[in-house]
Image: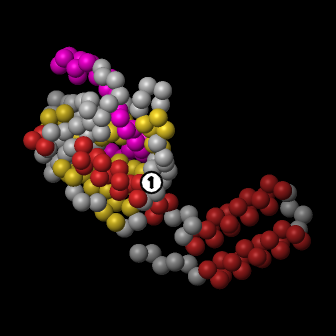
Amino acid sequence: MAERLDRAPMIDALRRSRARDRRTSHSAGGTWLARGAMIAALLVSLGALDWNRDTVFIDVELEHFELRATADGITTPVYRVATGTPAHPTPTGRFDLRHWIGNPGYTPGPAARANGAVATRPSRSGPLGYAKIPFFRSFQVHGGAHRYALGAPVTLGCVQLTDDAMRRLEAWLAARGALEAGIETPHGEVRHLFRRPTTLVIR
Protein backbone atom coordinates (compact mmCIF):
# COMPACT_ATOMS: atom_id res chain seq x y z
CA MET A 1 0.00 0.00 0.00
CA ALA A 2 1.36 3.43 -0.91
CA GLU A 3 2.44 5.55 2.05
CA ARG A 4 0.32 8.58 2.83
CA LEU A 5 1.90 11.98 2.33
CA ASP A 6 2.82 13.94 5.45
CA ARG A 7 -0.20 16.19 6.00
CA ALA A 8 1.56 19.06 7.81
CA PRO A 9 3.72 20.26 4.84
CA MET A 10 0.74 20.11 2.52
CA ILE A 11 -1.42 22.14 4.91
CA ASP A 12 1.38 24.71 5.33
CA ALA A 13 1.72 24.96 1.56
CA LEU A 14 -1.99 25.61 1.20
CA ARG A 15 -1.83 28.39 3.79
CA ARG A 16 1.14 29.99 2.01
CA SER A 17 -0.77 29.81 -1.28
CA ARG A 18 -3.75 31.61 0.22
CA ALA A 19 -1.47 34.31 1.67
CA ARG A 20 0.16 34.79 -1.74
CA ASP A 21 -3.25 35.17 -3.37
CA ARG A 22 -4.09 38.03 -0.98
CA ARG A 23 -0.76 39.83 -1.64
CA THR A 24 -0.53 39.47 -5.40
CA SER A 25 -2.54 40.80 -8.29
CA HIS A 26 -2.65 37.70 -10.48
CA SER A 27 -5.67 37.21 -12.71
CA ALA A 28 -8.70 35.61 -11.07
CA GLY A 29 -8.55 32.60 -13.41
CA GLY A 30 -4.90 31.82 -12.65
CA THR A 31 -5.37 32.29 -8.91
CA TRP A 32 -8.34 29.95 -8.70
CA LEU A 33 -6.68 27.36 -10.93
CA ALA A 34 -3.61 27.24 -8.68
CA ARG A 35 -5.75 27.18 -5.55
CA GLY A 36 -7.93 24.36 -6.94
CA ALA A 37 -4.88 22.24 -7.76
CA MET A 38 -3.51 22.74 -4.25
CA ILE A 39 -6.82 21.84 -2.61
CA ALA A 40 -7.14 18.71 -4.77
CA ALA A 41 -3.63 17.62 -3.80
CA LEU A 42 -4.44 18.18 -0.14
CA LEU A 43 -7.63 16.14 -0.36
CA VAL A 44 -5.81 13.28 -2.06
CA SER A 45 -3.17 13.32 0.69
CA LEU A 46 -5.92 13.10 3.31
CA GLY A 47 -7.66 10.25 1.47
CA ALA A 48 -10.81 12.26 0.73
CA LEU A 49 -10.48 11.72 -3.02
CA ASP A 50 -9.60 8.03 -2.95
CA TRP A 51 -12.28 7.03 -5.46
CA ASN A 52 -11.02 3.46 -5.77
CA ARG A 53 -11.55 3.02 -2.02
CA ASP A 54 -15.20 4.04 -2.37
CA THR A 55 -15.94 1.91 -5.46
CA VAL A 56 -17.98 -1.27 -5.11
CA PHE A 57 -16.82 -4.05 -7.41
CA ILE A 58 -18.99 -6.92 -8.64
CA ASP A 59 -16.76 -9.53 -10.26
CA VAL A 60 -17.88 -12.35 -12.54
CA GLU A 61 -15.46 -15.13 -13.50
CA LEU A 62 -16.93 -16.81 -16.56
CA GLU A 63 -14.56 -19.78 -16.48
CA HIS A 64 -15.67 -20.74 -12.98
CA PHE A 65 -19.29 -19.46 -13.21
CA GLU A 66 -18.81 -17.37 -10.08
CA LEU A 67 -19.90 -13.91 -8.91
CA ARG A 68 -18.69 -12.04 -5.85
CA ALA A 69 -18.86 -8.41 -4.71
CA THR A 70 -16.27 -6.41 -2.77
CA ALA A 71 -16.55 -3.13 -0.88
CA ASP A 72 -14.61 -1.60 2.01
CA GLY A 73 -12.32 -4.62 2.11
CA ILE A 74 -15.26 -7.00 2.61
CA THR A 75 -16.20 -9.66 0.05
CA THR A 76 -19.48 -11.52 -0.32
CA PRO A 77 -19.72 -15.29 -0.41
CA VAL A 78 -19.30 -16.72 -3.90
CA TYR A 79 -22.55 -16.98 -5.86
CA ARG A 80 -22.83 -19.53 -8.65
CA VAL A 81 -24.17 -18.18 -11.94
CA ALA A 82 -25.29 -19.27 -15.39
CA THR A 83 -23.70 -17.48 -18.35
CA GLY A 84 -24.01 -17.12 -22.11
CA THR A 85 -23.67 -19.95 -24.61
CA PRO A 86 -20.83 -20.05 -27.16
CA ALA A 87 -23.30 -18.76 -29.75
CA HIS A 88 -24.46 -15.96 -27.42
CA PRO A 89 -21.45 -15.17 -25.20
CA THR A 90 -21.57 -12.94 -22.14
CA PRO A 91 -19.71 -9.65 -22.83
CA THR A 92 -16.44 -9.18 -20.99
CA GLY A 93 -14.94 -5.95 -19.65
CA ARG A 94 -15.65 -3.28 -17.06
CA PHE A 95 -19.12 -1.73 -16.86
CA ASP A 96 -20.24 1.16 -14.65
CA LEU A 97 -23.61 0.36 -13.10
CA ARG A 98 -26.43 2.86 -12.65
CA HIS A 99 -29.59 0.99 -11.63
CA TRP A 100 -30.76 -1.98 -9.62
CA ILE A 101 -34.30 -2.80 -10.77
CA GLY A 102 -36.60 -4.88 -8.63
CA ASN A 103 -39.83 -6.48 -9.82
CA PRO A 104 -38.47 -6.38 -13.39
CA GLY A 105 -40.49 -6.52 -16.56
CA TYR A 106 -39.19 -8.49 -19.52
CA THR A 107 -38.92 -7.43 -23.14
CA PRO A 108 -37.27 -10.23 -25.15
CA GLY A 109 -34.65 -9.42 -27.76
CA PRO A 110 -34.58 -10.91 -31.27
CA ALA A 111 -32.80 -14.11 -30.24
CA ALA A 112 -35.20 -14.73 -27.36
CA ARG A 113 -38.24 -14.00 -29.55
CA ALA A 114 -36.93 -16.49 -32.09
CA ASN A 115 -37.01 -19.08 -29.30
CA GLY A 116 -40.62 -18.26 -28.46
CA ALA A 117 -40.15 -15.77 -25.60
CA VAL A 118 -42.84 -13.16 -25.07
CA ALA A 119 -42.89 -9.88 -23.14
CA THR A 120 -44.10 -10.01 -19.54
CA ARG A 121 -45.29 -7.32 -17.15
CA PRO A 122 -43.16 -6.38 -14.12
CA SER A 123 -43.15 -9.29 -11.71
CA ARG A 124 -40.77 -11.10 -9.39
CA SER A 125 -41.99 -14.37 -10.90
CA GLY A 126 -41.13 -13.39 -14.49
CA PRO A 127 -38.17 -14.61 -16.58
CA LEU A 128 -35.79 -12.14 -14.90
CA GLY A 129 -36.80 -13.19 -11.41
CA TYR A 130 -36.39 -11.02 -8.32
CA ALA A 131 -34.29 -8.21 -9.84
CA LYS A 132 -32.05 -7.19 -12.71
CA ILE A 133 -28.95 -5.01 -13.11
CA PRO A 134 -28.60 -3.66 -16.67
CA PHE A 135 -24.94 -3.32 -17.65
CA PHE A 136 -24.50 -3.22 -21.46
CA ARG A 137 -27.13 -2.84 -24.18
CA SER A 138 -29.73 -5.52 -23.43
CA PHE A 139 -27.38 -7.58 -21.23
CA GLN A 140 -28.16 -7.84 -17.53
CA VAL A 141 -27.27 -9.55 -14.31
CA HIS A 142 -30.59 -10.95 -13.11
CA GLY A 143 -32.37 -13.53 -11.02
CA GLY A 144 -34.70 -16.32 -12.00
CA ALA A 145 -32.09 -19.05 -12.44
CA HIS A 146 -32.99 -22.62 -11.60
CA ARG A 147 -30.32 -24.15 -9.41
CA TYR A 148 -29.72 -26.87 -11.99
CA ALA A 149 -28.71 -24.23 -14.55
CA LEU A 150 -25.95 -22.79 -12.35
CA GLY A 151 -22.43 -23.50 -13.52
CA ALA A 152 -23.49 -23.86 -17.14
CA PRO A 153 -23.39 -21.68 -20.30
CA VAL A 154 -27.12 -21.67 -21.01
CA THR A 155 -28.24 -18.02 -21.26
CA LEU A 156 -28.42 -15.66 -24.23
CA GLY A 157 -25.54 -13.64 -22.77
CA CYS A 158 -26.91 -12.46 -19.45
CA VAL A 159 -25.45 -13.43 -16.07
CA GLN A 160 -28.14 -15.28 -14.14
CA LEU A 161 -28.37 -16.01 -10.40
CA THR A 162 -31.03 -17.62 -8.26
CA ASP A 163 -33.57 -15.27 -6.71
CA ASP A 164 -32.20 -16.11 -3.26
CA ALA A 165 -28.72 -15.02 -4.35
CA MET A 166 -30.10 -11.77 -5.78
CA ARG A 167 -31.89 -11.04 -2.49
CA ARG A 168 -28.70 -11.64 -0.50
CA LEU A 169 -26.65 -9.51 -2.91
CA GLU A 170 -29.19 -6.68 -2.62
CA ALA A 171 -29.10 -6.81 1.20
CA TRP A 172 -25.28 -6.80 1.16
CA LEU A 173 -25.14 -3.77 -1.17
CA ALA A 174 -27.76 -1.89 0.86
CA ALA A 175 -25.86 -2.55 4.10
CA ARG A 176 -22.82 -0.82 2.57
CA GLY A 177 -24.75 2.23 1.40
CA ALA A 178 -24.46 1.30 -2.26
CA LEU A 179 -28.16 1.58 -3.13
CA GLU A 180 -30.63 4.44 -2.91
CA ALA A 181 -34.17 3.75 -1.70
CA GLY A 182 -36.32 2.26 -4.43
CA ILE A 183 -38.83 4.29 -6.42
CA GLU A 184 -41.75 2.47 -8.00
CA THR A 185 -42.34 3.37 -11.64
CA PRO A 186 -45.85 3.77 -13.11
CA HIS A 187 -45.65 0.34 -14.76
CA GLY A 188 -44.58 -1.44 -11.56
CA GLU A 189 -40.79 -1.80 -11.58
CA VAL A 190 -38.86 -0.62 -8.51
CA ARG A 191 -35.74 1.33 -9.47
CA HIS A 192 -32.78 1.91 -7.17
CA LEU A 193 -29.91 4.17 -8.14
CA PHE A 194 -26.43 3.06 -7.14
CA ARG A 195 -25.39 5.76 -4.67
CA ARG A 196 -21.76 4.62 -4.59
CA PRO A 197 -19.63 4.13 -7.72
CA THR A 198 -20.21 0.50 -8.66
CA THR A 199 -18.34 -1.38 -11.37
CA LEU A 200 -19.13 -4.76 -12.84
CA VAL A 201 -16.04 -6.65 -14.02
CA ILE A 202 -16.60 -9.69 -16.25
CA ARG A 203 -13.63 -11.79 -17.29
Q: Is residue 105 above or below residue 129?
A: above
Q: Is residue 37 visible?
A: yes
What residue appears at the point 52 percent right and 77 percent down from the top-left corner? 4
Q: What's the colour scheme?
A: secondary structure
Q: Is residue 102 magenta?
A: yes
Q: Is residue 84 magenta?
A: no
The residues colored magenta run 93-118
Q: Residue furthest left?
A: 148
Dot 1, crowdedness within 10 Å: few (<14), some or many (≥20)? Answer: many
Name the residue type under label 1.
Answer: Ala
Left or right of 149 on screen, residue 57: right
What residue appears at the point 30 percent right and 20 percent down from the top-left corner? 119
What residue appears at the point 67 percent right and 63 percent down from the top-left corner? 37
Left or right of 84 on screen, residue 30: right
Q: Which residue is labeled 1 in the image?
A: 178
Which quadrant of the figure has residue 41?
Answer: bottom right
Of residues 80 and 136, the one nearer the viewer is 80
- From the image, which quarter does the N terminus lie in? bottom left
Give percent across and percent down for residue 127: 24, 30
User: Tag 1, which secondary structure?
Assistant: loop
Give percent across and percent down for residue 169: 31, 52
Of residues 118 and 9, the one nearer the viewer is 118
Q: Is residue 138 visible?
A: no
Which quadrant of the figure has residue 71?
Answer: bottom left
Left or right of 82 on screen, residue 175: right
How many circles with numbers are drawn on the protein?
1
Give percent across and percent down for residue 65: 17, 48
Left or right of 182 on screen, residue 111: left
What residue appears at the point 24 percent right and 47 percent down from the top-left corner? 164
Q: Is residue 193 above or below residue 14?
A: above
Of residues 94 and 160, the one nearer the viewer is 160
Give percent across and percent down for residue 52: 45, 61
